[in-house]
Image (tube, rainbow, N blue to C red):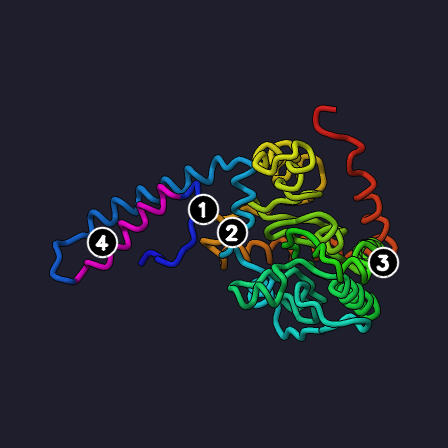
Amino acid sequence: MSDPTRTYLDFERPLAELEAKIEELESLAGDDAPDTAEETARLRHKANEQLASLYSKLDPWRKTLVARHPERPHFRDYRKALIEDFEEMCGDRRFSEDAAIVGGLGRFRGRSVVVIGHEKGHDTETRIKHNFGMARPEGYRKAIRLMDLAEKFDLPVLTFVDTAGAYPGLGAEERGQSEAIARSTERCLTLGTPLISTITGEGGSGGAVALASANTVMMLEHSIYSVISPEGCASILWNDSTRSKDAAVAMKITAPDLLSMKIVDEVVPEPVGGAHRHAQATMTAVGNAIEKHLGQLEQMDSRALRLQRRERFLAIGRTLPGA
């Protein structure tokens, strides 16, 4: 059966019409209606072809929309799929708990790990609870606390990044938002155990870098990673947020661009139609990529891990494509 509750993006409207027709035909099956199997199969084949065509030529703005898709797997989904025996740790021991960043101890395919990630929520109630994945200072200080714990017990750290950026509210600024982000970034860079970061949706600004200053940075095929949102960039450059499509192209925020500039180390392919249509397959692919890189990093001692991480980030921008 087709999924009648699926959310469609604007560019997917022709596909939505086809899948609605398929749903209608499937609902008629067995209700004394003429046999619809042949017509359903024809429409399904056409829908699959159209889906493949749409996702084979996504421009940067459409990739931005896909990266923000509300049905895309979030941290809670990756945690359930990849991490066993998870024990969440809450609070920064200074101010409060921040549900925008979730973290704790668990087992990844037999290895004890510390896992940290942005959580956006999946419905109105949880999105409000998790503040749409936009962390306050206490969220980043909780991440630092978890990384300290990882180093103390010699545990690898896995981070999952999906945030539009750190929360810009007055309270967050009063409690030292920029300092907390800087300290979290610093802790990533000085960590003496393997650190692997995966950008699963939006990698926005310092709010993303604070968890993504890793030995290995991966991103999903239709994720984005940028210093500012396309809308914010357009507002600053042209005083016109409607030019966000132009900004998305100019900023080179997509996986192929970032891979060519060596800002990310690997792009994890998504199934046709994006991670939101095939969540389990996507999460399995991410797990396989993490396992591969973790096996390599575990051969390095703490000094080598810090040096590799330092050299990785210092190398960004030294040589650019076409330079």
Q: Name the residue carrying label 2.
A: 69
Q: Amino acid at mark 3?
A: Ser
- Snapshot quadrant of residue 240: top right
Q: Which quarter shows the N terminus?
A: bottom left
Of badges 1 and 4, nearer the viewer stands 1
Q: CA distance from mark 2 to mark 4?
A: 27 Å
**Marker disc for residue 307:** none
Q: CA distance from mark 4 to mark 3?
A: 60 Å
Give residue 294's position: percent from left, percent from top: 70, 57
| Residue furthest right as drawn | 303
| Label whose residue precedes the other's in the sequence (2 or 3) | 2
| Cβ atoms under marks 2 and 1 closer than 8 Å | yes
| Residue at left offset 61%, top offset 44% | 224
Reply yes or no: does residue 278 show up in magenta. no
**Marker disc for residue 9:** 1
Q: Name the residue carrying label 4.
A: 25
Q: Amino acid at mark 1?
A: Leu
Please name whichever residue, 37 or 64, is drawn nearer the observer in this view of the structure.
Answer: 64
Of badges 4 and 3, nearer the viewer stands 4
Compared to 14, does 318 lie above or below? above
| Label whose residue precedes the other's in the sequence (1 or 4) | 1
Range shown magenta:
13-30
Q: CA distance from mark 2 to mark 1?
A: 8 Å
Q: CA distance from mark 1 to mark 3?
A: 45 Å
* SS assignment at label 4: helix
Q: Name the residue carrying label 3.
A: 302
Q: Amino acid at mark 2?
A: His
| Label whose residue precedes the other's in the sequence (1 or 3) | 1
| In this picture, residue 57 sits left or right of residue 13 | right
